Image: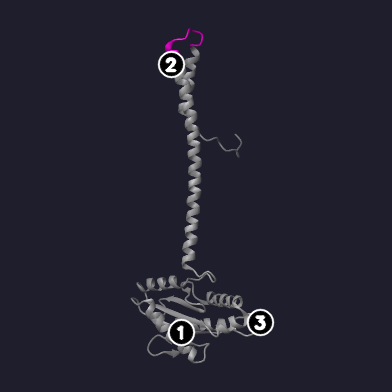
């Protein structure tokens, strides 16, 4: 046998085929004698057995095809289920977690650890849509997401909670670390080239909260959101903290 050839698969009905062949040998051995009731009955039995064997082979082939089709359908269903789950949890424009998914993640992580939450809002975003159109606004949002993804640590999660508002979940991060991350994000957006028609840049304002294990999204988001608006009142393109005491601007 050639080394590259594939050995034939064993016949599923090999034993039955051998019985049929043995019966034929017995039947043919009596072909020179006068027909007897036993030989006649054996001939009918062999004919019926052969017909039954052919039908069984046909049913097995049909069953194999049906099983193959079922397996293919199951794989397709698993793929569709994965797609639906992804779409249910991710923002269609940016690919980051949507509002519902980030809320669920924050609440789940609060069950076992402390969390810092960074909330940011693109400054004067309405001006971009009004002056350059919504497609250009979408490009700005994608650029902001690129800045976030380039800076946030691997264990962090990004969510889009509004049109131009985003949040970053930082598990087990203290006030110092979360403030540094927010400031790095602010600088990244400020220096990013968005290629707007008028050559202007984009900035964002940030609010940061930190809360211990056992807290929830509403409390953490509420504090970070208030710090965010303090940053906007302070002139925008700022990081304000709601971590250990009164709101205050971040100081590197």
Residue 190 placement, left or right of 17: right
Residue displayed at 48% across by 35% down: 59
Residue 95 placement, left or right of 108: right
The mark nearer the N terminus, 1 or 3, is 3
* Residue at mark 1 to residue at mark 3: CA–CA distance: 29 Å
For this orientation, the residue located farthest to the left is: 214
Under tag 2, what secondary structure? helix
Percent x, y of residue 233:
48, 91
Percent x, y of residue 205:
50, 85
Q: How many marks?
A: 3
- Mark 1 = which residue? 207
Magenta range is: 30-40
The mark nearer the N terminus, 3 or 2, is 2
* Residue at mark 2 to residue at mark 1: CA–CA distance: 94 Å
Q: Are marks 2 and 1 in contact (CB under 8 Å)?
A: no
Under tag 1, what secondary structure? strand
Percent x, y of residue 40:
45, 14
For this orientation, the residue located farthest to the top is: 34
- Kindly report which numbered mark, 2 or 1, lies closer to the viewer in this rendering: 2
* Residue at mark 3 to residue at mark 2: CA–CA distance: 95 Å
- Mark 3 = which residue? 197
The mark nearer the N terminus, 2 or 1, is 2
Q: Quadrant of residue 132?
A: bottom right
Residue 250 makes an appearance in the image: no
User: Is 204 included in the stretch rendered in magenta?
Assistant: no
Q: Quadrant of the N terminus?
A: top right
Callout 1: 10 Å neighbours few (<14), some, many (20+)? Answer: many
- Mark 2 = which residue? 41
Callout 3: 10 Å neighbours few (<14), some, many (20+)? Answer: few
Q: Main SS type for the magenta part?
A: loop
**Tag of residue 227:** none
């Amino acid at each position: 046998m050639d080394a590259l050839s594939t050995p034939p698969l064993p016949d599923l009905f090999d034993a039955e085929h051998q019985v049929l062949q043995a019966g034929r040998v017995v039947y043919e051995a009596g072909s020179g004698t006068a027909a007897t009731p036993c030989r006649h009955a054996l001939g009918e039995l062999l004919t019926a057995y052969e017909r039954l064997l052919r039908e069984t082979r046909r049913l097995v082939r049909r069953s194999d095809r049906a099983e193959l089709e079922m397996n293919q359908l199951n794989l397709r269903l698993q793929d569709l289920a994965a797609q639906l789950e992804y779409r249910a949890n991710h923002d269609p424009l940016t690919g980051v977690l949507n509002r519902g998914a980030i809320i669920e993640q924050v609440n789940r992580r609060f069950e076992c650890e402390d969390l810092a939450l960074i909330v940011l809002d693109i400054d004067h975003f309405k001006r971009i849509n009004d002056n350059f159109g919504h497609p250009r606004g979408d490009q700005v949002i994608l650029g902001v997401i690129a800045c976030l993804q380039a800076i946030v640590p691997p264990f962090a999660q990004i969510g889009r909670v509004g049109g131009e508002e985003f949040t970053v979940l930082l598990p087990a991060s203290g006030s110092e670390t979360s403030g540094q991350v927010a400031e790095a994000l602010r600088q990244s957006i400020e220096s990013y080239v968005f290629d707007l028609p008028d050559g202007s840049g984009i900035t964002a304002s940030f609010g940061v909260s930190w809360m211990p294990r056992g807290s929830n999204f509403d409390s953490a988001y509420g504090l970070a959101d208030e710090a965010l608006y303090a940053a906007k009142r302070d002139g925008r393109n700022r990081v304000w903290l709601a971590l250990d005491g009164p709101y205050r601007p971040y100081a590197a």
